[in-house]
Image: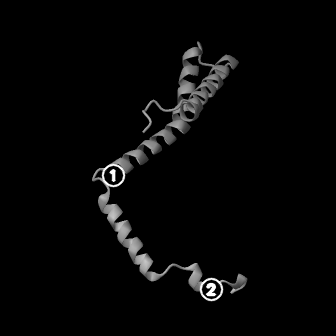
């Protein structure tokens, strides 16, 4: 063995594995019944936010740009509006998720 160690010092004893398994099964039973629903709802909300981030922001910018253009042709003004809206929405999302803090009371 390198460094003078032994296998016995690197592993836990089998009895501690069984104790850990009993503790883990007790923790599973102690969970509230709505924990799985809460986890699924959180995962669904995360997916929704992720999809909205990559599709909703550009679509919103294109919609605002289309409302500001008078004709059917592409102009630099419309491109500027679309880029500005995308930058504003991204800035809002960065502020909201990283700098806004929480309105919930601290425990």
Q: Element type at marker 1? A: helix
Q: Is residue 74 visible?
A: no
Mark found first going from the N terminus, 2 or 1? 2
Q: Which mark is residue 47?
A: none
How busy is the neighbourhood of tag 2: few (under 14 within 10 Å), some, or many (20 plus)? Answer: few
Residues at discs 2 and 1 in contact (Cβ within 8 Å) = no
Question: Which of labels 2 and 1 is toward the front?
Answer: 2
Q: Is residue 8 visible?
A: yes
Total labels: the figure holds: 2
Reading the image, the residue beneath label 2 is 6
Reading the image, the residue beneath label 1 is 35
Q: Is residue 40 above or below residue 64?
A: below
91 with respect to 4 (left or right): left
79 with respect to 64 (left or right): right
Q: Is residue 99 above or below residue 36?
A: above
- Where residue 24 appears, as percent x and y from the top left, is 38, 66
Question: Which image quadrant for residue 90?
Answer: top right
Question: Which image quadrant for residue 107?
Answer: top left
How busy is the neighbourhood of tag 1: few (under 14 within 10 Å), some, or many (20 plus)? Answer: few
Q: Is residue 15 above or below residue 36?
A: below
Q: Quadrant of the N terminus?
A: bottom right
- Where residue 61 appears, as percent x and y from the top left, is 57, 26
Residue at x 32% of width, y 65% of height? 26
Residue at x 44% of width, y 36% of height? 106
């Amino acid at each position: 063995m390198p460094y003078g160690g032994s296998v016995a010092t690197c592993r836990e004893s089998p009895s501690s594995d069984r104790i850990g398994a009993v503790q883990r099964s007790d923790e599973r039973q102690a969970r509230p019944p709505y924990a799985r629903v809460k986890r699924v709802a959180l995962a669904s909300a995360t997916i929704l936010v992720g999809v909205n981030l990559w599709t909703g922001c550009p679509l919103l910018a294109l919609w605002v740009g289309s409302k500001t253009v008078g004709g059917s042709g592409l102009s630099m003004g419309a491109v500027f509006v679309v880029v500005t809206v995308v930058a504003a929405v991204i800035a809002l999302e960065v502020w909201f998720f990283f700098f806004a803090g929480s309105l919930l009371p601290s425990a």
